[in-house]
Image (tube, grey):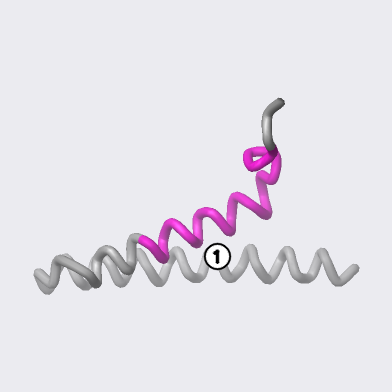
């Protein structure tokens, strides 16, 4: 297995782990009524994890159309 394949699988795993962590984090903050910056931070982390996942699995979404 090449290094780029290992890196791709690691980034894929990392993005899924970050998404799960941020969903749990959002749920915790909403249950404790701590709405504000912590929820925005968790939503930002969730969006970054989605971007990482899509950039590895669907790279054609980020190609410039021309």
Residue in the foreground of this view, choosing between 38 and 29: 38
- Which residue is located at x 63 percent, y 63 percent? 12
Quadrant into which the N terminus falls = bottom right
Q: Is residue 52 above or below residue 2?
A: above
The answer to which image quadrant residue 43 occupies is bottom left
Q: Which residue is mark 1?
A: 15
Residue 4 falls within the magenta-colored stretch: no
Query: Which is the main secondary structure of the residues drawn in magenta?
Result: helix
Question: What is the secondary structure assignment of the residue under circle 1?
Answer: helix
Could you say where residue 53 lies in the image, as x and y percent from the top left? 58, 56
- Which residue is located at x 68 percent, y 35 percent? 64
Q: Tell me: 38 left or right of 34.
A: right
The answer to which image quadrant residue 23 occupies is bottom left
Mark 1, Cα crowd under 10 Å, few <14 / some 14-19 / many 20+, is many
- Which residue is located at x 79 percent, y 70 percent? 6
Could you say where residue 22 lies in the image, as x and y percent from the top left? 37, 68
- Which residue is located at x 50 percent, y 61 percent? 49
Could you say where residue 34 lies in the image, as x and y percent from the top left? 13, 72
Residue in the foreground of this view, choosing between 4 and 23: 4
Q: Which residues are magenta?
A: 44-63
Q: Tell me: 33 left or right of 46.
A: left
Residue 51 falls within the magenta-colored stretch: yes
Residue at the left extreme, as displayed? 33
Residue at the right extreme, as displayed? 2
Quadrant into which the C terminus falls = top right
Q: Tell me: 20 left or right of 66.
A: left
Could you say where residue 15 lies in the image, as x and y percent from the top left? 55, 65
């Amino acid at each position: 297995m090449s290094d780029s394949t290992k890196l791709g699988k690691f980034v894929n795993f990392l993005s899924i782990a970050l998404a799960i962590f941020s969903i749990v984090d959002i749920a915790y903050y909403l249950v404790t009524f701590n709405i504000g910056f912590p929820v925005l931070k968790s939503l930002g982390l969730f969006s970054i994890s989605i971007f990482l996942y899509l950039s590895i699995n669907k790279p054609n979404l980020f190609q410039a159309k021309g």
